[in-house]
Image (spheres, rainbow, N blue to C red):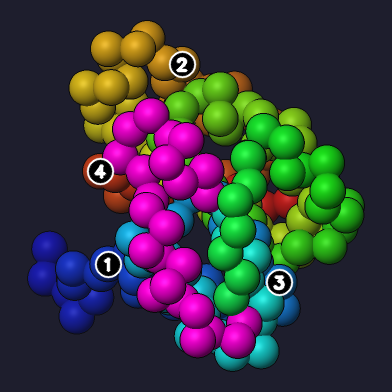
Amino acid sequence: MKSSYNSNLTYKDLLESIIFLKNPKKIIEFGILDGFSLQVFSSKKDCQIEAYDIFEDFNGNGSSRDVVEKFKDYKNVSITYGDFYKKFLEIEDNSVDIIHIDIANNGDVYQFAIENYIKKLKNDGLLILEGGSEERDEVEWMKKYNKKKIKPYLESLKLKWKNIGNFPSITLINKI
């Protein structure tokens, strides 16, 4: 179909649009890798971003501590060691505008995020998670380690969510 809206939008475009629409003051990010999403989020100068990673403790394609050096001059970004499975205990409920999770996501990570992090969001907050498409559920490591698929878990939820893209895909979940 011919349309002036046919385009190859990127995940950067999507994240920039979310920042524009949500106008966040506080973002928490788990999983930094090379800092792609952190770079996008940090462009909002009046927003404080807390980024956490387990760096060399991750058994896989993880972030190196070089990323801390990359963002050292960003006044609105703090990068520290932080375990996704423990950090929620330190975050106040209803205090965060956006939480972004990209830590080798699978169905169990999604379930943990919803059970422990959605309450950390403000009432109009947004949970952004890497993955969620059928194609993403079929990556080699998900099958090799028999990880719980994301798509069926999402479909079982009574929350409002939207999955975008085929691979790697991204899922948005509104706090209701």
Q: Is residue 44 left or right of residue 146?
A: right
Q: Is residue 170 left or right of residue 80?
A: left
For marks 3 and 2, give the CA distance.
Answer: 30 Å
Find out whether residue 72 is within the magenta segment: yes
| Numbered disc in front, either 3 or 4 | 3
**Label 1 secondary element:** loop
Task: Categorize mark 3 by other alpha carbons within 10 Å: few (<14), some (14-19), many (20+).
Answer: some
Q: Which residue is mark 3?
A: 26
Q: Which residue is mark 2?
A: 148
For marks 2 and 4, give the CA distance.
Answer: 17 Å
Q: Is residue 105 left or right of residue 158?
A: left
| Numbered disc in front, either 1 or 3 | 3
Residue 51 percent coordinates (x, y): 58, 61
Q: Outermost residue, bottom direction?
A: 45
Q: Amino acid at mark 1?
A: Thr
Task: Categorize mark 1 by other alpha carbons within 10 Å: few (<14), some (14-19), many (20+).
Answer: few
Q: Which residue is mark 4?
A: 167
State the extent of the magenta-drawn residues as a range.
Answer: 53-76
**Label 4 secondary element:** loop
